[in-house]
Image (cartoon, rainbow, N blue to C red):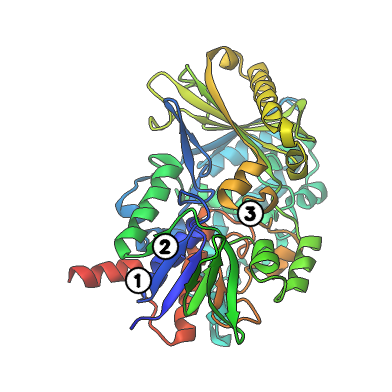
Amino acid sequence: MNESVIVIGGGVAGLSAAAYARASGFDTTLVEHSAALGGVCTAWQRGPYLFDGCIHWLTGGPFTKVYEELGILRRVQLEPIRHLATIEDRTTQAHVELTADLDALERSLTELAPADAKELHHLFMAARALPEVTPPLDKAPDLFTLRDGLGTLWEMKGELATVLHYQKPLAEYVAERLKTEALRRALTAFVPKEAPALFLLMVLGYLSRGWLSRPAGGSAAFRDALIDEVRELGVSIVTSATVEEILVSDGEASGVRLADGSFLRSDAVICTSSMPELVFQLLGGRYQAAATEERLAHWTLFPPIVLASYGVASPLSQLPQILVLRGVEPLDVGGVQNDTFYLRVYNDDRCHAPPGHSVVQAMLSTSYSWWAERHGSYESERDYLARRVLAAIDRQLPGVERACDLWDIATPLTFWRSARSWRGAYEGWIPSGGALHSGPLPHRLRGVSGLYVAGQWVEPGGGVPTACSSGRMAAQVLCADRGLPFSPPQAARGRASA
């Protein structure tokens, strides 16, 4: 009789963990709060438009192996990105095209900031070299021996000085190293300023190698491919079921209690909930409470956002897929002033809009508490914001408001209700401060045997690629603890077809 495992959460990390656990021989049950699987990797239909809520770009390179193992690449075509984004600054009049041609990008930034030519040269040298530093995806760090650790350091010996040099927050790096204000504003427009400068360099390096892509069909196609793999492997899926408690008997996880009062028993549990929900609710604050409170007090969360999506009766073919506008007239979004608009223009994939139409989506910072306190006025505030954001976009892109067919607003409460994103932090920790120096958290929860964790709250920086790999690592650690061979889904398919 096989050992059994319950996976809490049907987002990307939970689906990944379930696939790897099932392929490794566990009787696997996945329990999801929502009626739909995918978590924040989602898209939703509004009339003739498909509004995409997740993937703006997908990191490949070393992560490609994980997508292959999960069967995603058998079902979805990944289209390499040559032009990632355009940055326009209304304050400095700077115009920057983030393209895969790093030589051209370096020349354009040097023209913008000739006084910073030397520093830019060092920065781009680092961007070209850093993709050689590969994350430890094949073996979970929890299982590293001393030899493994030394081997990892040896492999990155040539770039170790560069990694250490660019570990400081991006805002701190540009303030200390760059002389030109227009360049500082351009380089901090695209990634969180609290994240290490290294993050921006890795994005540019991966872009230059063709390792950034968009899945044909968007987030929905990627999500559905992963769901199909999980179903084909024989994972038992329970949706519209909220886990209220993780059962612990004699210090060992033994199953879960659902909100309807029913119990599901298992030999192990993999949880992909947010760390606060896991520790304070599902475990009642009995394990790792002090450590979690310390992180919440000192680590930085990704800020909650509003996603404002508009179906537009215009192809907008002249616009880039990502347009970042800095120095615009500030717009209050749920108590937070936004003077930068991050716009996603879905004009490159016909799945999102009918011919001759497109989707424009604004991602704006906001406050979770502000929306949570609206109560009876929530819907009217949401509708009012939809009109104000559309008018603000139209001031930058004239004609969009007149061509708008319909709209949709997702607030931090939407992220909580649909994907249990704690206080709207849809990607957990920003990799800065303590989160940066800590690196990935252990995939075992200390104090409870047989309880494993995965997902964006385990991997600072979050994102779909790390969620996929985090589920893989949790299943790998589970196998190691049980003395069972770890088998990727790809290998399980091979055995089944032999």
Q: Quadrant of residue 202?
A: bottom right
Q: Amino acid at mark 2?
A: Val
Q: Nearer the viewer, residue 86 or 247?
A: 247
Residue assigned mark 1: 23
Earlier sequence position, callout 2 versus callout 3: 2
Q: Which residue is mark 3?
A: 199
Q: Nearer the viewer, mark 2 or mark 3?
A: 2
Q: Secondary structure at mark 3?
A: helix
Does 274 sit left or right of 333 as displayed? left
Q: Residue furthest front?
A: 261
Q: Position of residue 264 (x, y in %)?
A: 48, 71
- Residue 361 sits in quarter: top right
In the rendered structure, which disc, 2 or 1, sits on the residue that comes first in sequence? 1
Residue at (75%, 58%) from the top-left corner?
Answer: 168
For the residue carrying disc 2, how many other residues have a C-alpha within 10 Å: few (<14), some (14-19), or many (20+)? many
Query: Is residue 232 toward the left or the right of residue 118 in the image?
Result: left
Amino acid found under the numbered disc labelled 1: Ala
Residue 199, position in %: x, y? 63, 54
Front residue of 361/413: it is: 413
Do the residues bearing badges 2 and 3 touch, measured as CB atoms within 8 Å?
Answer: no
Question: Which of these two is toward me, 85 or 72?
Answer: 72
Placement of the C terminus among the 4 image quadrants = bottom left
Residue type beneath disc 3: Phe
Give coordinates of residue 383: x percent, y percent: 65, 25
The answer to whether the residues at label 2 and label 1 have Cβ atoms under 8 Å apart is no
Tell me how far mark 3 sits from mark 1, CA to CA.
Answer: 33 Å
Q: Residue at x 46, y 41 (%)?
A: 81
The answer to whether 125 appears left or right of 185 in the picture is left
Which residue shows up at 74% across the image and 52% down it?
Answer: 194
